[in-house]
Amino acid sequence: MKHLHIASSERGLISPMELNRPAGRFFYLLFIFLLLCLALIWLFPMYWMYTSALKSSSTIVKFPPILIPQNPIWKNYLRAWTELNYPRYFFNTIMLALGAWGLQMTISTAAAYAFSKLKPLFSKVIMFLFLSTLMVPSMAYLIPQYLTVVKVPLIGISLLDSWWGVLLPQAANAFNIFILKSFFDDIPRDLTDAAVIDGATALQSFLRIIVPLSKPVLSVVTIFTLIGTWKDFFWPYLVLTGSPQSQPIMVALYRMTTALSYPQPLNIQIAGMAIAATPPLVLFFIFQKKIIRGITLTGLKG
């Protein structure tokens, strides 16, 4: 126990021996100060957004700015919820997020399992091609992807103004496949080999052995997929332009707060942005330990 206590106390950028020196303490305090400054820089825009939603529109644009609302107007949030028709667009966003999650759990996990355990022909080349897509800016293949959705090859149907046009391009994610494969590589192959000897098929080995042992990394993929789908704007904006009632919350918020025929006060717009930003933040704070644990376990080898 003493050895474990000593080992845990030495985890950090600066060892306990260096902290006993004046220079070590100085750099340690400097590092903490810089981290606090970075945290404040990241948190201040969020603080400004949530507090500005409690002000009047004229108070928001005052200079110098008023950082603490004197008379908070809490009904701004209720007005934004009702006037911007948030129940409808929350439902749309939740359905799109669940659809993207279902496709990721089906396609990305199966692809990662095939690369890790089944080793198909030219698997390394195929994996390299998958990972190479991470090096290409998303805007570079935006037009080909859009033209594919406008008229799906071989089938010849259009997926515009439908949720399938938003979901299908997200069905396989190279980053998720990579972290899933890295985690699956650490699962001993003896387990799947033993299952095959007992008569299990590759699908049974995947569902009964790999998936139950992969809950940490599946949690990471789940959270990344849900948050990424929730905050996605540009692609749903392109695909669902002609179908306003099926748009997710980010697209609907932009459409309703910028349309000349649907003017909204500035404080109501900011309140709507604050409401839209809250679910991903809550999700992250609840599952942040699972995210860190899953990423840590994914990085372990041997």
Image (cartoon, rainbow, N blue to C red):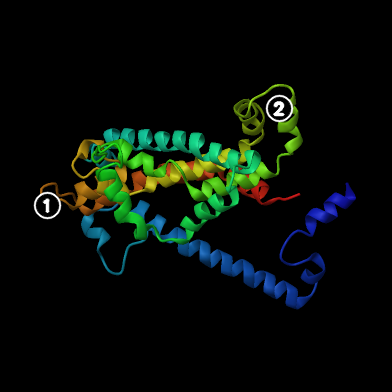
Sequence-earlier tag: 2 or 1: 2
Circle 2 — which element? helix
Q: Is residue 226 above or below residue 27?
A: above
What amino acid type is highlighted by mark number 1?
A: Leu
Question: Is residue 36 in sight in this rendering?
Answer: yes
Q: Residue furthest right?
A: 2
Residue at 60 percent across and 51 percent down: it is 124
What x and y, as percent, mark residue 167?
Answer: 36, 39
Tell which of 167 and 39 is nearer to you: 167
What x and y, as percent, mark residue 187?
Answer: 71, 39
Q: Is residue 207 above or below residue 54?
A: above
Total numbered badges shown on the rendered structure? 2
Residue 45's image quarter? bottom left
What amino acid type is highlighted by mark number 2?
A: Val
Q: Residue furthest top?
A: 199
Which label belongs to residue 260? 1
